[in-house]
């Protein structure tokens, strides 16, 4: 929130338009989902919230959020949506998008993770040390598998390729649930025994593992193959053409990489080395 002296100085010296400009310079404006652990939450407990706060502090700014559930149309209705008064945009940065995301321009990656097979321990699957073992189990054991299967994603491709679709318990990639995001629902159903395992994106797997005592789950990395890719780099998204902000984010990522990695690791997210990125084209100022 802006202090009264700042607002008063704006209005006296240059009117409402200039005031809006000053406020924009004083804020690090983030587009985020209000209930999407471990990424972002309105209580600011997500790792993206922590990184946004770190960047804003170094820029001498305050974080300002535009909250919207991250569903289809999220980018269109946040990052690319103009303010109601037609002056500027609602927010400027999406803290986590796939590197090279086609709906935004992207910063350099700030972490790289993989899908993992997350297995609840003590339910008859403790001998599984490699996901490939599931495809070679005796038929009786395969028929006992209760594994979450999403409507889309590499995990479902893998289940199909390995003849395990019939063992899948169906889930939607976007729940539409006002009380649980996907990771929260998986955590709930694992505890209830509705499922025993799931192929889950690293940050979500880290969240689920973090809700139970250490050692409650085995997390087995899913290895990418030429047919199915499981590991991805994550960057920050800005509007196409917003090159100065992109450069600013790149500099902040370079400067703070050890601290960023520490924040992400504290959420039990499995991290892999960030692979070299394709050479970027020169941006115009």
Image (cartoon, helix red, strand yellow):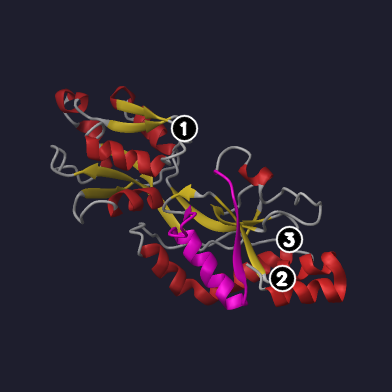
Q: Earlier in the sequence, mark 2 or mark 1?
A: 2
Q: Secondary structure at mark 3?
A: loop
**Horizontal and vertical percent position of residue 281:** 71, 61
Residue identifier under label 2? 25
Q: Give the alpha-carbon distance from disc 2 to disc 3, as whole Å.
A: 15 Å
Residue identifier under label 3? 242
- Residue 275 visible in the snapshot: no
Q: Is residue 199 left or right of residue 90?
A: left
Specify the segment rendered in magenta: 40-69
Q: Residues within 10 Å of mark 2 (few under 14, many from 20)?
A: some
Q: Is residue 130 left or right of residue 173?
A: left
Q: Earlier in the sequence, mark 3 or mark 1?
A: 1
Determine if the magenta segment contains residue 225: no
Residue 197 higher or lower than 17, as above or below: above
Residue 155 higher or lower than 248, as above or below: above
The quadrant of the image that shows the N terminus is bottom right
Front residue (pair 2, 259): 2
**Which residue is pictured at 81% across the width and 51% down the height?**
86
Q: Residues within 10 Å of mark 1 (few under 14, many from 20)?
A: few
The quadrant of the image that shows the C terminus is bottom right
**Horizontal and vertical percent position of residue 50:** 47, 65
Q: Is residue 56 left or right of residue 48?
A: right
**Cβ–Cβ under 8 Å for marks 2 and 1:** no
Residue 152: image tag: 1
Q: Nearer the viewer, mark 2 or mark 1?
A: 2
**Which residue is pictured at 66% across the width and 49% down the height?**
78
**Horizontal and vertical percent position of residue 244:** 72, 68
Q: Give the alpha-carbon distance from disc 3 to disc 1, as whole Å.
A: 32 Å
- Residue 284 visible in the snapshot: yes
Q: Secondary structure at mark 1?
A: loop
Q: Earlier in the sequence, mark 2 or mark 3?
A: 2
Number of numbered markers: 3
């Amino acid at each position: 929130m802006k202090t009264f002296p700042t607002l008063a100085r704006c209005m006296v010296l240059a009117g409402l338009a200039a005031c809006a400009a000053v406020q924009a310079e004083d804020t690090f404006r983030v587009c985020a989902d209000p209930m999407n652990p471990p990424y972002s939450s309105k209580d600011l407990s997500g790792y993206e919230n922590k990184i946004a706060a770190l960047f804003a502090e170094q820029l001498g700014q305050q974080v300002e959020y535009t909250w919207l559930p991250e569903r289809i149309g999220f980018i269109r209705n946040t990052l690319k949506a103009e303010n109601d008064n037609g002056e500027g945009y609602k927010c400027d940065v999406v803290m986590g998008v796939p590197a090279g995301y086609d709906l935004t321009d992207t910063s350099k990656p700030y972490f790289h993770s993989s899908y993992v097979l997350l297995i609840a321990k003590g339910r008859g699957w403790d001998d599984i040390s490699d996901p490939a073992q599931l495809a070679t189990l005796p038929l009786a054991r395969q028929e006992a598998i209760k594994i979450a299967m999403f409507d889309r994603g590499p995990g479902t491709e893998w289940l199909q390729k390995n003849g395990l679709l019939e063992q899948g318990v169906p889930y939607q990639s976007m729940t539409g649930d006002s009380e649980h995001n996907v990771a929260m629902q998986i955590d709930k159903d694992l505890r209830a025994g509705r499922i025993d395992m799931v192929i889950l994106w690293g940050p979500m797997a880290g969240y689920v593992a973090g809700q139970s005592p250490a050692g409650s789950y085995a997390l087995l990395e899913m290895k990418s193959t030429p047919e199915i890719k499981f590991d991805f780099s994550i960057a920050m998204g800005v509007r196409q053409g917003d090159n100065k902000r992109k450069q600013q984010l790149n500099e902040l990522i370079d400067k703070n990489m050890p601290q960023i990695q520490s924040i992400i690791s504290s959420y039990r997210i499995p991290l892999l080395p960030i692979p070299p990125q394709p050479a970027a084209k020169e941006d115009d100022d």
